[in-house]
Amino acid sequence: MSSDEHPARTAGLASQAAVRARDKDAWLALFAPDGIVEDPIGPSGFDPEGKGHRGPEAISAFWDKAIAGTDSIEFLFGDSFACGAEVAFTGTIRSTIGGHRIDAEGVFTYKVDDAGKILALRAFWEVDRAMATATPIG
């Protein structure tokens, strides 16, 4: 993964660190007031209408629904590509929940504003493919 400093890469790495640390307040502070989370993009159990989670209250509710219930989340990214005000990370997000490990392989993008706040976190991964990886832990 490139080590070049880039505002979107910096924000993406900070987002990942806050999730790993289970620090909701730090994670929420990374977003612009009109930021949006689409994880995954389109309709899902987290977002039945597929419109994304826009603004602080909706993004906080996303955390409660998608992140808080996990035991841990790891970001197993092989590389990242920064262009303009955006970065795309490629690889796998590994979650443990209820005694199972689930791997969501995909492309995960972050777009930032001029202040380096996240305008958009978008995750390209397929729910069915991720659920097919569910494996009991030890």
Image (cartoon, rainbow, N blue to C red):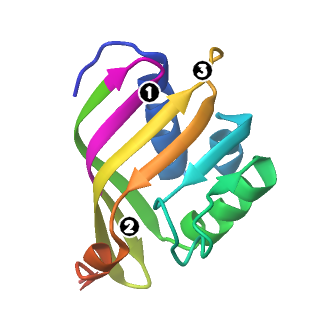
Are the two marked residues, 3 and 2, in contact with CB atoms closer than 8 angstroms? no
Which residue has dot 2 on it?
95
* Looking at the image, residue 21 lies above or below residue 3: below
Q: Nearer the viewer, mark 2 or mark 1?
A: 1
> Percent position (x, y) of residue 28?
69, 43
Measuring 31% from the left and 79% from the top, which residue is drawn there?
A: 128
> Percent position (x, y) of residue 29?
71, 36
Residue 103's quadrant in the figure?
bottom left
Disc number for residue 116? 3
Callout 2 secondary element? strand
Q: Nearer the viewer, mark 1 or mark 3?
A: 1
Which residue has dot 1 on it?
86
Given residues 63 and 45, the one toward you in this image is 45
Looking at marks 3 and 2 on the same chain, the residue that comes earlier in the sequence is marked by 2
Callout 3 secondary element? loop
* Looking at the image, residue 74 lies above or below residue 69: above
Q: Amino acid at mark 1?
A: Glu
Q: Amino acid at mark 3?
A: Gly
Q: Residues within 10 Å of mark 3 (few under 14, many from 20)?
A: some
Q: Amino acid at mark 2?
A: Ser
